[in-house]
Amino acid sequence: MAQNGGVNQPSPARPRADFYEAVGGEATFRTLVARFYEGVANDPVLRPLYPEDELAAAEERLRMFLIQYWGGPTTYSEQRGHPRLRMRHAPFAIGPAERDAWVRIMKSAVDSLDLPPELHTQLWDYLLGAANSLQNRPG
């Protein structure tokens, strides 16, 4: 807890750190991202967006990003700098079909974790919002 004028207030980073710990830490995010990329590898819409030699690297980047975002180690920023998600995704044509495929595969991966409902909702709401915000082509 941080002191602010004599009043205890939670540190801004604690809610995510608490989430990271509550869902099972790195192991849970490894499982989530591995299941997601298993789906991507076989998806006719998303697979063409990943050159063969980039699939494993993309998996690692997403895993590191999600671990950091949800309160785990800051390896992503240490290796890659600020996430800048919209900028990093700008070169890829992400329309409704790509967004919908990503959402479908990620939803299956999230559901497979069997998280408590409140944690599932928190994680899924973020991922769905991220998917919607990264669409960069009209329908």
Image (cartoon, rainbow, N blue to C red):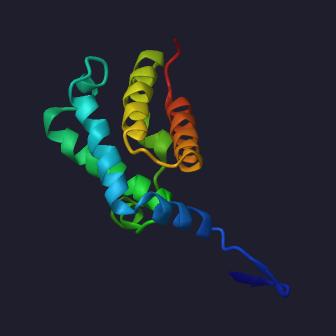
- Residue under the point 30% across and 24% down: 46
Front-lying residue, 87 or 9 = 9
Q: Is residue 51 left or right of residue 19?
A: left
Q: Tell me residue 116's x, y (percent).
A: 52, 49
- Residue under the point 20% across and 40% down: 54
Residue 52 higher or lower than 59, as above or below: above
Give the position of the N terminus as an image quadrant.
bottom right
Q: Is residue 23 left or right of residue 121?
A: left
- Residue under the point 41% across and 54% down: 65
| Residue 31 visible (yes or no) | yes
**On the image, which quarter does residue 26 sit in?**
bottom left
Residue 106 higher or lower than 24, as above or below: above
Q: Residue furthest left?
A: 53
- Residue under the point 42% across and 40% down: 110
Front-lying residue, 6 or 109 = 109
Q: Tell me residue 42's x, y (percent).
A: 21, 24
Q: Is residue 95 left or right of residue 1?
A: left
Front-lying residue, 35 or 129 = 35
Q: Tell me residue 62's x, y (percent).
A: 35, 48
| Residue 71 visible (yes or no) | no
